[in-house]
Amino acid sequence: MAHLVFASLVIAQVFYAAARVVNLNQLCPYNEAYTSYTDWTRTVFMDTHNDYRSQLAMGQQKNGPKRMAQYARNMNQMYYICDIEKEALKSAKECSETPTVPPEYKANAMLVPMDATITHDDDAAKKAMEAWWEEFDNYGLNKMLFSQEAEDAGKVVHATKMAWALNNRLGCATHKCGDKYSVVCFYPKMVNTVGKYVYSKGPNESDICTKCPSGTTCIEEIGLCDVDDLGSLFP
């Protein structure tokens, strides 16, 4: 049975501040044999994805250097899934930016060099996610339509996986590879489907959350659609 980490917005941040200090592994305890990183790092992965998605949903994200992305009508809040983490770790241990990925997932992967600012796995996680998300700032995606051209160009394929509105599940892992960290995040294979929009767009602030998927409720403060039944996260 899959094990769930709740969305970070409903868990006290003081717990996670302690997690890095005392190496807590309470959120994915059955993965302890597979990975040494802590609940703090898991929270960094989940928080960062949701923070970026909220930024996009609320009309605060660039889509290329000279324009802003439109508001999102249907942006789900993401949940961290421990069973997906377990699979991501297998790929992270390959120490490759093109690791093996099971057919039911798509992946973002990056090798992050250690330096004075990258001393822990959560530092590497933040660095990787920042680099992936900056693809929106640097290149943008025309009409937020994931076309074959966008797939072939590969310029925004990491950001779009993070932002895919109808997805609400992820699992990530880090692994030390010599003087680098391997950082890998897995998402269900539905992300980056050619011919589909990353999210449903609206030109006005009033459009936020107006097309939340069935079985979700809008969190108005952050513009994300939160799942009503946690059991639905495990297909």
Image (cartoon, helix red, strand yellow):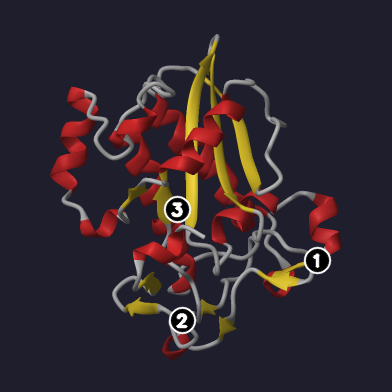
Can residue 111 be seen here? The reply is no
> Which residue bears the numbered disc 2?
212
Residue at x-position 35% and y-position 64%: 230
Q: Regarding mark 1 in the picture, which secondary structure is present there?
A: loop
The image quarter containing residue 200 is bottom right
Type of amino acid under label 2: Cys
Q: Nearer the viewer, residue 97 or 94?
A: 94
Residue 20 horizontal/vertical position (percent): 24, 29
Mark-to-mark CA distance, 3 and 2: 18 Å
Question: Would you say residue 27 is visible in this rendering?
Answer: yes
Instruction: Where is residue 23? Give x, y as percent.
Output: 24, 24
- The amino acid pointed to by label 1 is Ser
Density class for disc 1 (Cα within 10 Å; few <14, some 14-19, many ≥20) is: some
- C-beta proximity under 8 Å, tags 3 and 1: no
Q: Residue at x 71, y 32 (%)?
A: 100
Which residue type carries mark 3? His
Q: Which one is closest to the eye, mark 2 or mark 1? A: 2
Q: At 61% from the left edge and 29% from the top edge, which residue is drawn? A: 91
Q: Mark 3 = which residue?
A: 49
Quarter of the figure with residue 58: bottom left
Contact, CB < 8 Å: mark 2 with mark 1? no
Q: Is residue 208 shown left or right of residue 11? A: right
Q: Secondary structure at mark 3?
A: helix
The residue beneath circle 1 is 147
How far apart in space, not on screen, are marks 3 and 1 (Cα)? 23 Å
Crowd rating for badge 3 (residues with CA inside 10 Å; few <14, some 14–19, many 20+):
many
- 45 with respect to 29 (left or right): right
Relative to 50, does residue 66 appear above or below in the rendering?
Answer: below
Q: Nearer the viewer, mark 3 or mark 2?
A: 2
Residue nearer the viewer, 207 or 164: 164
Lower position in the chain sequence, tag 3 or tag 2: 3
